Image (spheres, grey):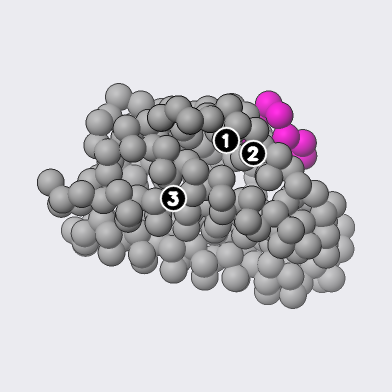
Amino acid sequence: MGIVKNDAGREIMLRMVRGIQENKAYLGEIDGLIGDGDHGMNMNKGFTLYSEDLGDEQTTFADGLFDLGTVLFNKIGGSMGPIYGTLFMDMSEVIEDEEEIDLTLWSKMLETGLESLYDIVDARPGDKTLIDTLYPAVESIKKAEELGECFEKALEDMKSAARQGMESTKDLVAQYGRSARLGERSRNVVDAGATSCYILLESIADGMLKLMVTK
């Protein structure tokens, strides 16, 4: 059975930071096609502030997600700060007292995060938002848990499901945010929030896979 130690969180958190920093320009570019164009800049600001606060310190995955969520919630502009802030802080609560993260706990983290977003946003799958990436990731992990698959395979399958979800937003019409005003003209561009969500899920999964140990 594969597990990830909660106290090895620094590796995962820094992968998330790098994922956003390395894609800052791309996120801004696609957001600028149908939105305000500030998604890359805002996300980069939040993740960079978090990494500066972390410095050379170690962190658990639980504390890392909570601290990152707090920074995003309080210090970046737009709607995505509260959205990602809520997501990460609520996910962190699932593992705050856990030493090891297995497939079951990761499934619970993702599902808790999705439900927390459903409490604060009206968007649902098909509305061209980050939900279109997160929802299939949750469903993929839940299915893997039900089938008794190994954690490693579950994470790889989750990445594929999340990527397909992100790519599906290219064919959707935006229902929320500035891009919703464009109507049909919002088609043919992937959603920036869905894209950053994929980058983050991929970063987390790759970090977990690197740190995975067999128990």
Q: In the figure, 38 relative to 125: above or below?
A: above
Element assignment for label 1 = helix
Residue 47 percent location from the top left of the image? 62, 40
Residue 148 percent location from the top left of the image? 19, 58
In primary-sequence order, the first of circles 1 and 3 is 1
Q: In the figure, 89 relative to 181: above or below?
A: above
> Is there CB contact under 8 Å for labels 1 and 3?
no
Element assignment for label 2 = helix
Magenta segment includes 88: no
Disc 1: which residue: 51
Disc 3: which residue: 204
Res 144 visible: no
In primary-sequence order, the first of circles 2 and 3 is 2
> Seen from this angle, which residue lies furthest left?
215
Question: What residue lies at 56% left-to-right and 45% top-to-bottom?
Answer: 17
Determine which quarter of the picture holds residue 117.
Answer: top right
Residue 101 has which mark?
A: none
Magenta segment includes 76: yes
User: For this rendering, which residue is in front, 56 or 190?
Assistant: 56
- Report the amino acid beneath label 2: Thr
> Is there CB contact under 8 Å for labels 2 and 1?
yes
- Report the amino acid beneath label 3: Ile
CA separation in Å, label 2 and label 1: 5 Å
User: For this rendering, which residue is in front, 85 or 172?
Assistant: 85
Question: What residue lies at 28% left-to-right and 64% top-to-bottom?
Answer: 153
Boundaries of the magenta span: 72-78
Disc 2: which residue: 48
Res 199 visible: yes
